[in-house]
Amino acid sequence: MFKKIASIVLAATMMIGTAAITASAAETNEAVAAADETVGAADETVGAAEGDAVGAGNKVYFEVNTSLWKNFKTVRLYMYAHDGSDFPLNTWGSKKGDMEEEGDNIWSFDFDKKGYTVESGKQYGMIFCTDTGIQTCDIIFDSSVMGDTAYCTGDMVENNVDSNKKSYY
């Protein structure tokens, strides 16, 4: 019982901390973009570490580290509205979240092509996973990250649903 309560407290702490970091990063990137319009928008990266965006439009990208993720056929996006409202990609393992392989270990999910709308100003949670059960921890994002690339740092954390499993950060 203690382990379950501790897991719930840890998961809540992670979610609050992730949301605060995401909000802070978004504010910083908006300030950089406004200060230097001649260069263009600042690079933003979904996830735990900084990197370069690989695209634009209404897509999110995921770079697979093949030394961490092996023997899979498909990368999927699981996504939910952070405010608890319904979102069509919130069924775990649904093929609706299948991503397209772009090459060079980059996978993409095109919201326009798949018919999904990410509302401006609304926060969502997303998890990238494979058909073999490997997954990232929850990433909190909003529409400002479209065109950005998420990737794993190699660190792992306790899965927020099953304390016997680990998720990549």
Image (cartoon, helix red, strand yellow):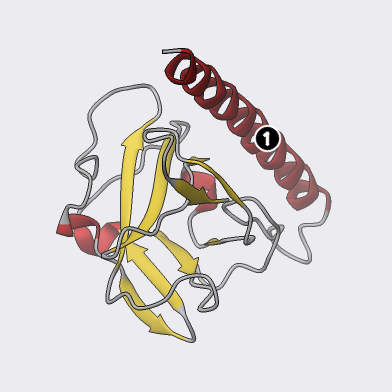
* Residue type for callout 1: Ile
Q: Nearer the viewer, residue 144 or 77?
A: 77
Q: Is residue 132 left or right of residue 10?
A: left
In the picture, the quarter occupied by the N terminus is top left
**Which residue corresponds to mark 1?**
21
Quarter holding residue 43: bottom right
Relative to 144, is 123 above or below? above
State the residue lying farthest toward the right. 35
Residue in the image at 24% along x and 36% along y = 87
Q: Is residue 32 left or right of residue 47?
A: right
Q: Is residue 47 left or right of residue 99?
A: right
Q: Is residue 103 left or right of residue 67?
A: left
Q: Residues within 10 Å of mark 1 (few under 14, many from 20)?
A: some
Residue in the image at 34% along x and 63% along y = 109
Q: Nearer the viewer, residue 165 or 91?
A: 165
Q: Position of residue 117 (x, y in %)?
A: 29, 45
Residue in the image at 51% along x and 26% along y = 11
Q: Nearer the viewer, residue 161 or 152?
A: 161
Quarter holding residue 18: top right
Q: Position of residue 97 (x, y in %)?
A: 24, 57
Number of numbered discs visible in the structure rendering: 1
Relative to 118, is 111 above or below? below
State the residue lying farthest toward the bottom. 103
Relative to 41, is 140 above or below? above
Q: Position of residue 106 (x, y in %)?
A: 46, 76
- For mark 1, give the secondary structure: helix
Residue in the image at 83% along x and 49% along y = 35
Q: Position of residue 9 (x, y in %)?
A: 53, 17
Relative to 88, is 83 above or below? above
